[in-house]
Amino acid sequence: MIKVEVTNNRISFLGHANYNDYGQDIVCAAISATMMTSVEAIAKFDIDAITIIESNDKVELIQNKHDNITNKLINNMLDLLKELEKKYPKNIKIINKEE
């Protein structure tokens, strides 16, 4: 299961969806595509608005700026992830944490 931990300034993606074998997992691919499309869109407007930290089984997005465009793109990404969570509750869980 991919756990998406959300705080005010950080979104962490941990684990693997385990919907199918590695390389054939449509849930993992959908989550990755949603995240990367959002990150690329934010970077088009302001490269400094977000920082990405990658490690073995974890990707962290740190929101450095809370301007209108960045907030809208982050919220859109979270809305799309919530839709995936509804369809695949065994494979993605979104956890809202207060910072």
Image: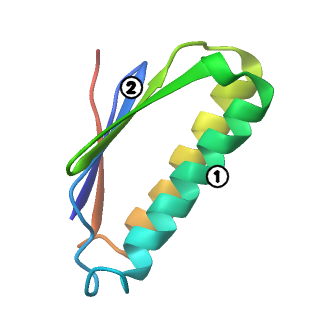
* Residue in the image at 51% along x and 45% along y: 78
**CA neighbours of label 2 inside 10 A, class few (<14), some (14 to 19), many (20+):** some
For mark 2, give the secondary structure: strand
Residue 98 location (% of width, % of height): 28, 20
Position of 81 relative to 24 (above/below): above
* Amino acid at the residue labelled 1: Thr
Above or below for 20 versus 13: below
Which residue is labeled 1 in the image? Answer: 37
| Residue visible at 56% across and 57% down in the picture | 34
| Residue picked out by circle 2 | 10
Q: Position of residue 89 (x, y in %)?
A: 29, 70
Distance from disc 2 to disc 1, alpha carbons, whole Å, reads: 17 Å
Q: Nearer the viewer, residue 70 or 82?
A: 70
**First reached walking from the N terminus: tag 2 or tag 1:** 2
59 and 73: which one is in front?
A: 59
Callouts 2 and 1 close, C-beta under 8 Å: no
Q: On the picture, is 39 further left or further right than 1?
A: right
Q: Nearer the viewer, mark 2 or mark 1?
A: 1
Residue 57, given in percent of the width and then of the height, sits at 21, 51
Taking the spot 43% from the left edge, 19% from the top edge, the residue there is 9
Residue pictured at 20% horizontal, 48% vertical: 56
Q: Is residue 99 left or right of residue 69?
A: left
Q: Amino acid at mark 2?
A: Arg
Q: Closer to the camera, 49 or 81? A: 49
Other-residue count near label 1 (Cα within 10 Å), few / some / many at <14 / 14–19 / ≥20: some
Residue 55 placement (x, y as % from top left)? 25, 41
Residue 48 quadrant: top right
**Circle 1 SS class:** helix
Q: Is residue 49 left or right of residue 20?
A: right
